[in-house]
Amino acid sequence: MATDKTSLKLDKTIPGAEDFLPLLGTDHVELYVGNAKQAAHYYQSAWGFQPVAYAGLETGVKDRVSYVLQQDKIRLVLTSPLKSGGEVNQHIDAHGDGVKMVALWVDDATKSYNETIKRGAKSYMEPQKKEDKDGEVVISGIHTYGETIHLFVERKNYNGAFLPGYKVWNPDYKPASVGLKYIDHMVGNVGWNEMNKWCEFYANVMGFAQLISFDDEDISTEYTALMSKVMSNGNGRIKFPINEPADGRKKSQIEEYIEFYNGAGVQHMALATDNIIETVTALKNRGVEFLYVPESYYDTVLDRVGEIDEDLEPLKQLGILIDRDDEGYLLQLFTKPVLDRPTMFFEIIQRKGAQSFGKGNFKALFEAIEREQEMRGTL
Ligand code: FE2
């Protein structure tokens, strides 16, 4: 029972999705970063990720180093180059630290590759078998938006810590987990007029279906505007909202991302918890910074979302946002960018029935900020 976390997100059948690419879940997310050793310390200390595996000079890898960290089902890989030149340096030079690989867990990496290539995917890596004393894995990969890659990882014949070539990384330093469970969704930012193209890619090449769309009418404010569609695979385990900028009076946050990331890329990872109050309290105590939520947001929030199980006061103290849809409600909040460039951030989310993504919060949050500005006479 203790290992069965799937009850958190019951599989469903997404209408319109096709089953030529069955995905078991997210295998891992690999970031290319300037200093993986220090990034690993940050994700351990601030975020409660646990050390799992390591590859580098000590394991015979000459040009890069990788640290693997895990919290429940969320597995991060942090990779830095050890020499100048090469793919990792080029990526960091262009984008700063950022997500390179969104690796998907499959039963058959060769079939996943063939089915997506047949439908028009651009190859990143033909299926490759890698083995060591713990068994074998097969990995293949295709390109998606920007320079981001989807790997397909088949690991049913593997029992090692992570992948062949990695050794167990087991330092004494292990700050406690903060209760993060799994990746709820991962959002891609793409350029002007590219949202539909990439949604079609997920539909046609990967068999995903569209869950929801909201346009700039829904979530535009005076200052920021975006359009977004949510693509999901057939069992609902993989959800990829795709954003593109829309015209606002000032530069949209998506545009700012595209400018500083030098193109399309992963904007945020939403990490799920069963107890958002405990998780966010722990994250704040460890120095993770969240977006400001004005107190006035809480003046009207219950009129909008109705009754909730939680007391409002701790939510208000922590700046946790609330939204409701036909199926229930959700609690969420967003970190500030976790990098120097204003690019990637995280969302913490707790779902209480709601299957949507917090659309109501865009407008409510902005209106609350406006109310505060009004009080200061600066609007
Ligand atoms: Fe999100």
Image (cartoon, rainbow, N blue to C red):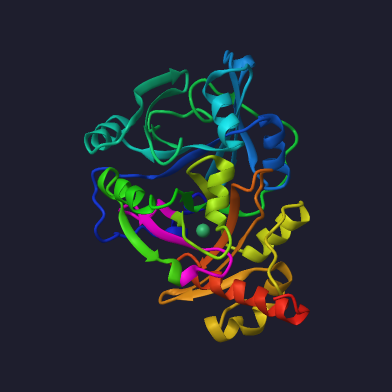
Percent from the top left, x then y, of residue 204? 25, 47
Q: Quadrant of residue 42?
A: top right
Relative to 201, does residue 92 appear above or below in the rendering? above
Relative to 61, does residue 255 appear above or below in the rendering? below
Percent from the top left, x then y, of residue 68? 59, 33
Per the rendered image, the range of residues in magenta is: 218-242
Residue 353 showing in the rendered view: no
Residue placed at 36% from the left, 22% from the top?
128
Residue placed at 61% from the left, 72% from the top?
366
What is the total number of numbered labels drawn onto the structure image?
A: 0
Relative to 108, does residue 8 appear above or below in the rendering? below
In screen coordinates, is 85 left or right of 235? right
Percent from the top left, x then y, of residue 256? 58, 51
Is residue 44 magenta-colored? no
In screen coordinates, is 354 left or right of 206? right
Residue 66 showing in the rendered view: yes
Is residue 235 magenta-colored? yes
Percent from the top left, x then y, of residue 210? 32, 59
Relative to 196, does residue 328 appear above or below in the rendering? below
Residue placed at 29% from the left, 29% from the top?
110
Outermost residue to the front: 249
Residue placed at 65% from the left, 56% from the top?
335
Outermost residue to the bottom: 303
User: Which quadrant, please, contains the C terminus?
Assistant: bottom right
Near-viewer residue (127 or 299)? 299
Q: Quadrant of residue 125?
A: top left
Near-viewer residue (267 or 8)? 267
Near-viewer residue (271 or 362)? 362
